[in-house]
Image (cartoon, helix red, strand yellow):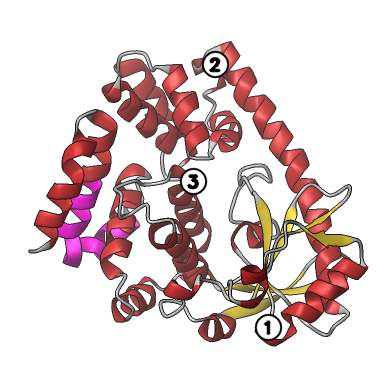
Amino acid sequence: MSQMRLKAYRFIADAVSPFVSGDDVFHQLTQQASLDWEAVASIAGGHSITQALYPALLEKKLIDSVPDDFLSYIKYLHELNCKRNKMMRKQLINAVLVINKLNIKPLLMKGSAQLFLDTFSNEGDRLLTDLDILVPSSEIKHVCDELIENGYEIYGEKEHFVYSHHHYPPLIKQGECAMVELHRDLMFYKQQHVFPTEYAWTKAVDITLPNMAKAKVLIPTYRVFHSFLHSCVVDKLSQIGQIEIRQLHELARAQFMYSSDIDWEEMLGYAHDHGVHRQLYANLYAASKFMSIHDLEEILSRHTMRSIFHYIRVRSKLKYNWFDALDTKLTRYISRF
């Protein structure tokens, strides 16, 4: 079963990668034993990438190569996510307009920014759980009160959220499909030294949303870096030896769309100065292999061993059921050197 999960993982990564052709994926499907489509569905769902499969297979002309029931399943989820993302775009525009009345341009974080950028080829590719908005720390209560005046209410208020957490309690509004999270910082306080909020504001640029709403987003180099931090450092996926296809997909799309605007040397230098360069190299190496981003290979040539080790960990966890039990001790032992 684990061997089938590895094949399923590779199929999903190849299918959504903009650097892998439809002919290559078709060749993979015809040259190997048949895929376990239940494993494909399970992994895609676990990595929050199911909604991106349908447009990817359609673009690569592989619709006729997958079972009808699987095709219907991914098409339905994609269409559902398209509708949800359209609703979230409208909701976010209205929230930003409210914030603009206070003479504040909020910084749209993570998926909120992607709703208005051209990183992805399809509006339903990215699955969002909530709308993350960064505002100046000194203004966060004022912004929260203004949104409450406009129909929002605090969901499950907790005192530690208000006074010490990096974001306020989630805000919900009747008739809207998503929670809004107002952030005073990009990172949880234990990780703030890696990407300080004050520094993030200096790496943001203005954008204009529909209805003349004004906001900011991080420049491509630091959008990629923040996505990596959130997945691999904050959520600790690097530590436990996992690579999230959704995060690799976003990185691949960013490289595909903004390659000339991403300063890898600056990013890697910044990561080294803040002690997360090993995790970043490992993440980029996995992306270069699983997503076939060959442009990254030259960049990674100087720090290959640690990156290869992490890539082997990911493959082994997918391929061998027993590897998890060995992984913690093995990681600690090798990390000494």
The quadrant in which residue 133 appears is bottom right
Residue 73: mark in rendering? none
* Circle 1 SS class: loop
Q: Along the horizontal axis of the image, is 193 left or right of 97? A: left
Residue 215, image x and y in percent?
Answer: 74, 74
Q: Nearer the viewer, residue 45 or 209?
A: 45
Q: Amino acid at mark 3?
A: Arg
Around disc 2, counting alpha carbons within 10 Å, would you say few (fewer than 14), some (14 to 19), or many (20 or more)?
A: few
In the image as oriented, which residue stretches furthest toward the front?
159
Judged by depth in the image, the label closer to the viewer, 3 or 2, is: 3
Q: Is residue 302 magenta?
A: yes
**Alpha carbon separation for disc pair 1 and 2:** 51 Å
- Whether 277 is drawn above or below 333: the answer is below
Whole-percent x, y for residue 328 in the image? 20, 48
First-in-chain label (3 vs 2): 2
Position of 333 with respect to 158 (left or right) is left
Label 3: which residue?
246
User: Which residue is at 22% across, 44% downward?
Assistant: 313
Query: Which circle marks residue 136 in the picture?
Result: 1
Mark 1 is surrounded, within 10 Å at the Cα level, by few (under 14), some (14 to 19) or many (20 or more) other residues, namely some
Q: Is residue 301 above or below residue 285?
A: below
Which residue position holds label 2? 64
Q: Where does the magenta region start and end?
A: 295-311
Residue 216 on the magenta segment? no
Main SS, magenta region, reads helix
Q: For the residue marked with disc 1, what is the amino acid?
A: Pro
Q: Quadrant of the N terminus?
A: top left
First in residue order: circle 1 vs circle 2: 2
Which picture quadrant has residue 97? bottom right
Q: Vertical placement of 41 versus 131: above or below? A: above
Please provide percent x and percent y for residue 54: 59, 30
Identity of the residue drawn at 47% across and 47% down: 249
